[in-house]
Image (cartoon, rainbow, N blue to C red):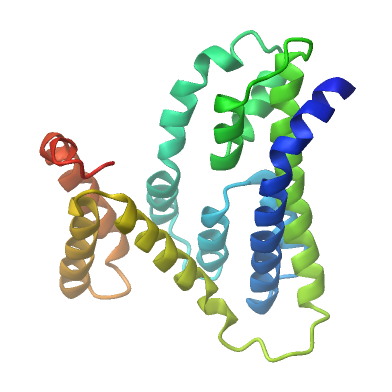
Amino acid sequence: MKKALKAAFPYTIPIFAGFWFIGLTYGIYMNVLGFSFWYPFIMSLTIFAGSLEFVAANLMLSVFNPLQVLLITLMIQARHLFYGISMLDKYKNKGIKKWYLIFGMCDETFSINYTANIPKDVDESWFLFWVTALNHFYWVSGATLGGILGSLIQFNTTGLDFVMTAMFVVIFLEQWLKEKKHWTALIGICCSIICLLLFKADNFMIPTMIAILCMLTLFRKPIEKEGGFS
C-alpha cells in the first residue's frame, strides 16, 4: 500500500498544481455568490466534477428545475461514459475499491490510470486507488481553502462571477483549435442562437441542448468522416 502511494504520487504532482489553482478559484467564486466554505467543501467532496460544480453554483441560485439540471449534467459529463467503457478491464476484480475508482474518475485521473506504467512490484488496485484519492484530495482541499479565504480577502470581488463564463470560453477555444473541422462548434453556436431567438434567455437552455444532441446524432458519420470530432 505505501509502495503504491510512493509510485502514484509523482504522477499526480502536475494535477495538484492545476487542481489547487482552479479549486481556489471555485471556492472564492462560491463565496462571492454568498455561500459559506461548507458548500464548496461538500460539493467538491460529493460531486467532484470540476466545470459542473461551477454550473451547479449558479443553478443553486436559479429557479428549481430538475429537468434542466439533469440535461445540463448529462451534456457536460457524458464523456465519462466513454471513459468508463475504456476502464472496464482495469477496474475489474478490484474489490470494494472499484466503487471509489468509478466515483472518482475525472479527466485527469482517467489519463493517469489509463496510461501509467505501473511497476511490477506495485499492486495495481492500490496504485489506481491512490491516484484517484490524491486527485480528489487536491480538488477538495483547494475548493475548501478557497471558500475560507474568500471570506477573508478584502479586495473588491465585483465581476469575479464572470470566471465561469471565461472558463467555458477558454474550453470552447481549446476545442476549436483541437478540431480539424469546426462542425461541432458551429452546430453549438447556431443551435444556441436560434433557440435564444425562439425561446428567449430564460427558456432557451433545454431546447438548445436537445437541438445540439439531435444534430450531433444526425450528422455523426459525416462529422467523423471530416475529422470534426478529432
Residue at x 59%, y 80% (from the top left corner)? 160
Residue at x 46%, y 68% (from the top left corner)? 63
- In which quadrant of the rendered image does the N terminus lie? top right
Q: Is residue 48 above or below residue 204?
A: above
The residue lying toward the viewer, choosing from 161 and 121, is 121
- In which quadrant of the rendered image does the C terminus lie? top left
Residue, far bottom: 156
How many numbered marks have been drawn onto this rendered protein structure?
Answer: 0
The residue lying toward the viewer, choosing from 202 and 117, is 117
Residue at x 60%, y 89% (from the top left corner)? 158
Q: Tell me where residue 174 appears, x and y as whole percent.
A: 39, 58
Q: Would residue 96 be seen by someone viewing this image from the given angle?
A: no
The residue lying toward the viewer, choosing from 172 and 226, is 226
Q: Is residue 94 above or below residue 189?
A: above
Position of 88 with respect to 217 (left or right) is: right
Residue at x 22%, y 71% (from the top left corner)? 196
Q: Tell me where residue 149 appears, x and y as whole percent.
A: 81, 73
Q: Tell me where residue 221 appears, x and y as whole percent.
A: 13, 34
Q: Would residue 74 be seen by someone viewing this image from the given angle?
A: yes
Position of 9 with respect to 115 (left or right) is: right
Q: Is residue 109 above or below residue 185?
A: above
> Quadrant location of residue 36?
bottom right
Q: Tell me where residue 69 appears, x and y as whole percent.
A: 44, 54
